Amino acid sequence: QKEVEQDPGPLSVPEGAIVSLNCTYSNSAFQYFMWYRQYSRKGPELLMYTYSSGNKEDGRFTAQVDKSSKYISLFIRDSQPSDSATYLCAIPGGGTSYGKLTFGQGTILTVHP
Amino acid sequence: NAGVMQNPRHLVRRRGQEARLRCSPMKGHSHVYWYRQLPEEGLKFMVYLQKENIIDESGMPKERFSAEFPKEGPSILRIQQVVRGDSAAYFCASSPPVPDTEAFFGQGTRLTVV
């Protein structure tokens, strides 16, 4: 079983839609959960991170963690064409470093006008 | 403050040649991480280095791959005797010597083996 699993999509939605991106993980000891966004031919950039369970909101983005079911989600409200990218969930491991990450496969999102 | 710089951005090598990928971390960052992104796969951790030390190489293939981060100069990921299966995007990330801080990624080097 992979440590982090993510549906690769692709996902295509109309502009203004609410997007739900999801990952599952296997190790109940994980505490930090991250979402990265990667535009085509670019490096990943950190979008949001959450600690333990609960929600975290940043503008149109909401990250949610459900530790009981080992499920993490990223919601995008009022999606825009500029949100078209690959979204990767990630879990840090390896001591106190947030640089050693286990990534999901990534979900390719297209928001069409 | 310039971001993580990787060069070259694109590299073409014939089978059997050597590939050298360079990564200059952000100013003040002494931790470097290398990742590989194969087509249709996610990002996979390869190696974590600090200045002059390899901290974690659990993701490095056992043969042909090596990495270094010297006291002066960029970090280098070296692939000897490249094969077609090495064609991928290689990303470098860096972070400061402070616990629980984000690592920032470079734009990657796209290696094509012909």
Image: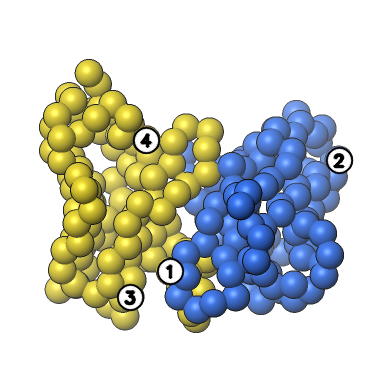
Left/right placement of residue A95 relative to residue B11 reads: left
Badge 3 amino acid: Phe
**Mark 1 or mark 3, which has the lower sequence index?**
3
Q: Amino acid at mark 4?
A: Ala
Q: Position of residue B11 (x, y in %)?
A: 74, 34
* Marks 1 and 4 belong to one chain: yes
> Badge 3 is on which residue?
A30
At which x and y percent is residue B96? Answer: 58, 70
Going 84% across and 65% down the picture, which residue do you hit?
A: B72
Work out whether mark 1 precedes mark 4 in sequence or the reverse, and give the earlier one.
Answer: 4
Determine which residue is flagged by label 4: A85
Secondary structure beneath label 4: strand
The color chain A is rendered in: yellow
Q: Around disc 4, counting alpha carbons within 10 Å, would you say few (fewer than 14), some (14 to 19), or many (20 or more)?
A: some
Mark 2 vs mark 3, foreground winner is: 3
Residue that label 1 marks: A92
B104 vs B45, nearest the viewer: B104
Q: Which residue is mark 2?
A: B17
Instruction: Please tell me which residue is depicted at 29% across the width and 46% down the height of the picture.
Output: A7
Q: Quadrant of residue A50?
A: bottom left
Output the chain of dot 3: A
